Amino acid sequence: MHTVTLQTHYHHVFRRRALILIALAVALVLTLMLDLSAGPASLSISDILSGLLNPENLELRHRIILFEVRLPDALIALAVGAALGLSGIETQTVLNNPLASPFTLGISSFAAFGASIAIIFAPSLPWLGHTAMLPLFALLFALLCGGLVLTFSQMLGGNRENIVLIGIALFFLGEALTSAMQYVGNAEAVQEIVFWSIGNLTKAGWTEVIVVTLCFFLILPFSMRHVWVMTLLRAGEAQAQSLGLNIRRIRFFVILRVSILCAFAICFVGVIAFVGLVGPHIARLLLGEDHRLLVSGAALCGALLLSLASFLSKALMPGVIIPVGILTAIIGVPVFVLLIAGKRRRP
């Protein structure tokens, strides 16, 4: 009888959390519509829905605005937010550190360093246009940082303390190298580096949306494949090892996919702060520690946060687009403080 009661309670909790996941998906669609409606052109949500279902219903200028300007910006916010949310939940779990995020590994600062090299020295290749060099260099240096973290962590035993320390060291190294690039660059180049470093969604087009989305959906199955392993890790490494899990090998592959996902997420849009940190905490608060739901929930929360920030960046000051990285930091800090305070009040 007691077993039946426990099973009933478990199924009830699982169904309730599944409904929360559905509610997050619905909220994401609503914020997407709000994001698409924000801007100087007089496009209502009903006009947008009608235009998406039947583009011929829109005037030519509204069709261009919707499909060539607003839709890529809104979709890149969802893709980057989901990628950062997924990266954040895996980083926090595998390092057992609530303050960990993809940027704890130094990936953001090395991406900024790569972008600054492209901006200042303006390298070009005969088979690649100049405009593609900035995201390419940001991507390559972000992947380089991930490779350095993996290499040094394997050399030093692969434990989580070493990974965090290596990541922090590489973060500060990337910041120092970026500052050195700013020191030798002219005023225009420095301004462009700063603008890239605070995050901006407006330069993304359909190519960028497709690349980031494909990267996310290629990495997601590997994350879903290890949901039971990641859930076990939350119970403690000792218990996971007693069940025969190779923690060092698991940590290696998680850091590998987090590095790839984060590198592709930020190389086109710049550094987006706090999404990879706050999104997973919100998901945990709503969904608990079951990674079968938490992986998708963290991705949805990350996408929801960045989509909301994208909407606010265009709605707060009519005629002006605020860099979205500024808003995610401004929104993320008080939300994170509230989450910490809420956890302390719970028994």
Image (cartoon, helix red, strand yellow):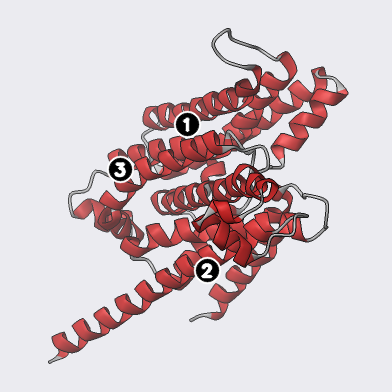
Q: Position of residue 187 (x, y in %)?
A: 87, 24
Q: Is residue 306 left or right of residue 24?
A: right
- Could you say which disc has been placed on residue 27 in the image? 2
- Mark 3: secondary structure: helix
- Could you say which disc has been placed on residue 146 in the image? 1
Q: Relative to the observer, which residue lies in front, 116 or 174?
A: 116
Q: Is residue 289 visible?
A: yes
Q: Identify the residue at image location x=63%, y=24%.
A: 134
Q: Earlier in the sequence, mark 2 or mark 3?
A: 2
- Name the residue carrying label 3: 250
Q: Earlier in the sequence, mark 1 or mark 3?
A: 1
How packed mark 2 is, by other alpha carbons closer than 10 Å (few <14, some 14-19, many 20 or more), is: some
Q: Amino acid at mark 3?
A: Ile
Q: Give the quarter of the figure containing the N terminus.
A: bottom left
Q: Amino acid at mark 1?
A: Gly
Q: Is disc 1 in contact with disc 3, using a CB cutoff of under 8 Å?
A: no
Give the mark toward the camera: 2 or 1: 2
Q: Is residue 336 left or right of residue 261?
A: right
Q: CA distance from mark 2 to mark 3?
A: 33 Å
